[in-house]
Amino acid sequence: MTNRRGLLIILSSPSGAGKSTLSRRLRDWDPTISFSVSATTRIPRAGEVDGQDYHFLTEKQFQNDVANGDMLEHAHVFGNFYGSPRAPVQAAIDAGRDVLFDIDWQGAQQIQNSALGPHTLSIFILPPSIAELHRRLTTRGQDSDEVIAKRMRKSWDEISHWAEYDYVLINDDLDCTEKSLKNIVTAARLKRIQQPGLNAHVKRLHTEFEETT
């Protein structure tokens, strides 16, 4: 049996398409899948733990990490910097553990273009319709009408990048979408590039073949 290299699993979608629920179900299915802990320059909120909720950095530390290539992706949002540190992700995939990223299309592009790009699996979740997307945002009861309107305006910008992903799922039935997501992850784990032990195995087969002929 060959050893496996971990995957960088990227899930993206407009708000309300079901990404958070699918992420939770994926981790319930395989608890060894971990969320990437982001780095940020914002001030910690009450109860947040450094290294668990976020890696809290000064702006200078963050900029140095970006300059040194230590961030897989980064962005400036509402006056603060956010990014995905490379070192813990590299350590996880080298140990055969998958890392899950809940990021937008811009972050996905940066990771796909990084040195770890060959080990990424990017999946975009589409809603069945715009009307259904609006219904889901409204029935959650978490946001004001103004916030929902902003999320709806942003949703098309997200959806317009669907073709940049490896796989695209239309989430019209949550259970069916979950099954498809698991199938995609299972198949991606078996890609040749994810199995570093294959070369050694084939060499052993070759040796055995030479010895028997």
Image: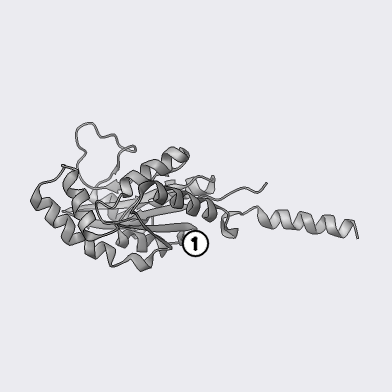
User: In the picture, residue 63 is in which quadrant?
Assistant: bottom left
Image coordinates for residue 199, horizontal then vertical, percent? 68, 58
The residue lying at 19 percent from left, 60 percent from top is 154
Disc 1 packing (10 Å; few <14; some 14–19; many ≥20): some
Furthest residue to the right?
213
On the rendered structure, is 45 left or right of 29? left
User: In the picture, residue 21 is in which quadrant?
Assistant: top left
Q: Quadrant of the C terminus?
A: bottom right
The residue lying at 16 percent from left, 48 percent from top is 138
Q: 183 and 82: which one is in front?
A: 183
Vertical position of residue 58 compared to residue 113: above or below: above
On the rendered structure, is 150 left or right of 178? left
Assign a secondary structure to mark 1.
helix
- Give, as a three-letter code, the residue at label 1: Pro
Vertical position of residue 117 compared to residue 99: above or below: below
| Residue that numbered label 1 is attached to | 118
The residue lying at 39 percent from left, 46 percent from top is 175
Q: Is residue 100 visible?
A: yes
Image coordinates for residue 23, horizontal then vertical, percent? 37, 45
Q: Is residue 37 visible?
A: no
Furthest residue to the top?
47
Q: 108 and 14: which one is in front?
A: 14
The residue lying at 62 percent from left, 47 percent from top is 3
Report the colour scheme: one colour
Image coordinates for residue 59, horizontal then vertical, percent? 23, 51
On the rendered structure, is 6 left or right of 39? right
Image coordinates for residue 212, horizontal then vertical, percent? 90, 56
On the rendered structure, is 197 left or right of 84? right
